[in-house]
Amino acid sequence: MASFRRILLSRLLLLSVPIILLGVSTTYFVTYRKARSGLLETARQNLTESAIRRGNEIANSIAALKSNLVAVSYHPVFRNNNEQQYPEFLERLSQQLPTQIECLQLIDATTRESLADTCDREIVEPLARRVWPQQYESLLPPPSTVKIQPILPENGPDLGTSCQKQDATSNANQLKLLSSIPIYNEAGRFYAILVARSVILEPNTLEPGSLTGSTAILDRDGTILVHPCWERVGRNIKEEAKEDSGRLQSILRKARAGEQNFIHLFSFEQKGVELLAGYAGIPNPIAEEREDIWVVLTMTPLRNALAALDEIQQVLLSLLSSLTFGLIIGTILTILYVSREIATPLERLIESIHDQDPLQSQDPIPDDFNVYEFRQLARAFNAVLDATRNSYELMDRTLQNAVQTSNDLKEAKKQLQEALEAERLANDRLTQTQQKLQEALEAERLANDRLTQTQQKLKESLKAERLANDRLREFLRCMSDRFRTPLTGLIMNLDLLRDEVEDGTIEIGSENEETLEDAYVSTKKLYDRHEQIAQMFSIAGDQFNNPDIQQVNLPRVLLELREEYHLRIQEKGLDFQARGWQDTEILIYADPVRLKEVLKALIDNAVHYTHTGSITLNAHIESVEGAVKQMDSENNNTNGSSFFPTGQRACIVIQDTGVGISPHKLEKVNNPWKYRMTEGLSIVIAHILMEMMKSTIVFDSEGENKGTTVYLCFPTVKKS
């Protein structure tokens, strides 16, 4: 058991030390936040001023470049049209101009051929000749004669690039411009164009604590002209990360209103790196419209702006640590002294009480303490001792009665505990039984809910399927009625016109006779195609919804198709190949009528869209990984749109070298329901018939003019 002195000491320490630590911590955090706010405010002001200065520098540099190019265009070498001096003059000029010139090129205004240049490769094509007058009489043209355009990456911005650290020789933080000015001879005739590729901004390296910042420039449309990452030059700010796109568009609006301020960006340079940026708007120095502006941003990582905060934090921690240690030591010494002064009289009082025998000794406890409360406590103890002695005899008499009563109570308590334990066990068993009953009722309710939901979904699926079949049947019936009558009348009229032309009743000329014959043949083919589609779907009967699935000898069907199409394909000048199935017995599950109609429609497509090359008809058997090998026990149907009970499937491959299918159309061809495909009716019909036969069809092509391959796969018959 702890003493009073120890308890008093521990309580005082527990109260005083946390208060000291709380005060020091509060002082630290308030001071730290104040220092951080001051550093941020300084960085924001410096970056905003840096953006204003950099914008003025850019405008002045471009204005100087224009003036220099205007002066150069009036040089005697150009005025006298001295072609021999062009190379030397351009080389000397690229070194003497104050703006950093990467290269110069003089281009003939008529032929667009290079007359002289200092470039390792050809410069981008300059502006069109018509932007300058063909004749100019003044001494010096105005600076507006110089046409300037920014140089963007040749391959466009890389939208997936994350800015990495750039070296000093990279294109990052550089504003590259392509400047063009007309050259007039002594007679004032426009004969050449001087093109200069120059660099306005130089790359800079950011050091910790630097507040000059790297540069980014946006035009009024939001296109990035300068960026620390060259690959993102030419990108629009709308394509930036979501957290930065809205902020950058807000900068454009504020800059147009003349505002100069700062902003925080989070993924503009590197993802996850917060940037502090100052911005300012300047008139577009390369545009003639005064309303056009550029927005100049100077940016630095937030960690660079707060680089001095680490040193402040270290000094503050050191100072506050020393102060805290001193306060704690002083507080401990004070508490030790106070605890001793308070605990000593109490310990003396306790020793006096321990030395007294309240039943044998009649001496009182000393009460000569300086502290009033302790003196009163000693007098109270003396009064208690007197009362104790008087009541001792009474207590002794009642002790025996109390012992007997205690024994009786113990026995009754034991019996009560046994009864309570029995009742508790019975309650536990009852609770467990009720819980199990509730679980069983909940499981039964969930099972009933799931059964109800399943029945409802099944009813909705059957209703949707019947509605889709009715709509398709109505569509095919309308198509048949609306197409057959006009096509029949057109064929009869064309046939009558042909007879009159042959009899000489009507003369239309040899060329028109060929046109009439082509129209008759095309109309006849269209009529045959219409009849073929109507026959494929058996519009008048119920076979559309109930295909006759049976065992089909696949090689026999393919042999009949080869005999039917062999001469027709050769007459078109195509090579028809059929291999891989002649000596093989392949039995599949399919509707033989629908199977032939699908294959004929696909071969007709191949013949129609193939002008040179070949058409190949192959068949083979392959294993199916993960194929469904059993029927669903509840609805007695296959699990999915196709099933392969033998673990194998027979695939028919129709390949041609025709016009092919573009990649963006290939997805629509393979998923006509998802994209609601309205063209290529034979392809849609083929999908429908294959789905009815619980089989699959897939179209594949490497692109336009690279041919098409169609895969039709059917479940095979299990061999006995």
Image: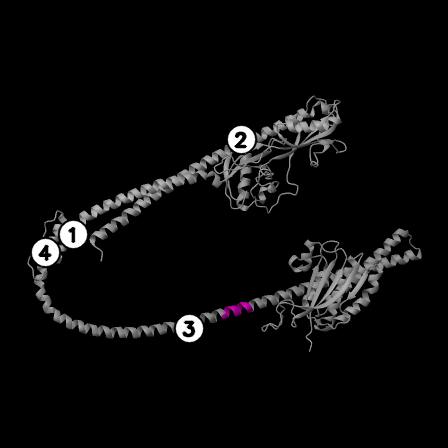
Describe the element under mark 3 as helix, strand or loop. Answer: helix
Q: For the residues carrying marks 3 and 2, which lies nearer the camera in this image?
A: 2
Find residue 426 and report its image quarter: bottom left
Q: Nearer the viewer, residue 46 or 600?
A: 46
Label 2 packing within 10 angstroms: few (<14), some (14-19), many (20+):
some
Helix, strand or loop under label 1: helix
Q: Which residue is mark 4?
A: 382
Where does the image place residue 278, in percent across and percent down from the top left? 51, 36
- Estimate the x, y position of residue 405 in percent, counting from the top left: 16, 72
Q: Amino acid at mark 1?
A: Leu
Q: Are marks 2 and 1 in contact (CB under 8 Å)?
A: no
Identify the mark nearer the N-term, 1 or 4: 1
Q: Image height check: is 189 above or below 594?
A: above
Q: Is residue 95 left or right of residue 506?
A: left
Mark 3 or mark 2: which comes first in sequence? 2
Q: Secondary structure at mark 2?
A: helix
Q: Quadrant of the N terminus?
A: bottom left
User: Based on the displayed image, in which of its 4 quarters is residue 143 positioned?
Assistant: top right
Among the two numbered marks 2 and 4 on one chain, the one whose residue lies closer to the N terminus: 2
Q: Nearer the viewer, mark 2 or mark 1?
A: 1
Outermost residue, left side: 362
Where 26 sits versus 133, above or below? Answer: below
Q: Which mark is residue 437?
A: 3
Amino acid on which the number 3 mark rests in the picture: Leu
State the extent of the magenta-drawn residues as a range.
447-454
Q: Which residue is mark 2?
A: 53
> The disc labelled 4 sits on which kind of residue?
Asn
- Residue 346's disc is 1
